[in-house]
Image (tube, rainbow, N blue to C red):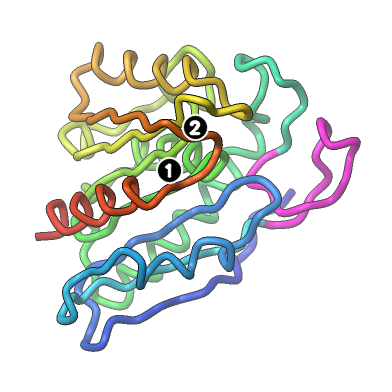
Amino acid sequence: MKPINLQKITIEPSSQATSCVIWLHGLGDSGAGFSPIVPILALPQDHKIRFVFPHAPEQPVTINQGSVMRSWYDIKSMDLHNRADLKDVLISEEMIHRLIQEQLDDGIVSHKIILAGFSQGGVMSLFTGLRYPKKLAGILAMSCYLANGDQLPPTLSSANKQTPILQHHGEQDEVVPFNAGQMANRLLLENDYQTEWKSYAMPHTLIAAQLADISNWIQKVLK
């Protein structure tokens, strides 16, 4: 996989955007899978938040018999410690940096940008956000784990040491083990990150109550 300029769905607010949420989908999905949630978030009518839903590149995925699908990185094993192909993770990080830079070039400052992601996308939001050299508004990591398994990413940036992090996980998650999310949360807390954890009685998905909590959090960190 080589870095590319990602295709994306962009949803603009009714007035000039002053902040942005970049929302990364999971394995085999696309930005179109999450873009319908914007009205469900029931944000104030006068909000000025741009939502960007990029499509991951298509590539073969080893655990799916090499089938080609949208994926932020190859998954070669279900073993948490070897699940994420770190070479691919670094390439996707570069592509996400380009998405952030597009917002900076459009006049949105970094501390008004949230990196959000579900499953594989959540892995990327944590990995990229914790290493990003400029202050972000927040990091939203849903139903995911750390790219390095039981370690935080290498080369952490001090710029986001105090950045609010919201971690959500389903208690009946059949795809990403609940304890994988808990491990990520524990490591972040042990290293003094400002993370908030909440679990829900759900499988590997999103539910209405969770989206209400996410809406409140987005409004709080972008205030």
Magenta residues, as a range? 57-73
Residue 56 picture quarter: bottom right
The correct choice, above or below, for 20 with respect to 94 in the image is below
Mark 2: few, some, or many residues within 10 Å (few <14, many ≥20)?
many
Q: Is residue 185 left or right of residue 68?
A: left
Q: Which residue is drawn at 74% across and 48% down?
A: 1
Element carrying mark 1: helix
Disc nearer the start of the sequence (1/2)? 1
Q: Position of residue 191 (x, y in %)?
A: 24, 15
Q: Which residue is drawn at 49% across and 18% down?
A: 180
Residue assigned mark 2: 144
What kind of residue is marked 1?
A: Ser
- Spot the residue most to the left: 223
What kind of residue is marked 2?
A: Cys
Image quadrant holding the C terminus, namely bottom left
Tell me whether circle 1 and circle 2 mark residues in contact (CB < 8 Å).
yes
Q: Where is residue 64 in the image (x, y as percent from the top left)?
A: 84, 37
Of residues 185 and 101, which is closer to you in this image?
185
Residue 182 magenta-highlighted: no
Mark 1: few, some, or many residues within 10 Å (few <14, many ≥20)?
many
Q: Where is residue 183 in the image (x, y as percent from the top left)?
A: 41, 14
- The CA span between labels 1 and 2 is 10 Å
The correct choice, above or below, for 16 with respect to 36 in the image is below
Residue assigned mark 1: 125
Residue 107 picture quarter: bottom left
Q: Position of residue 222 (x, y in %)?
A: 16, 59
Element carrying mark 2: loop
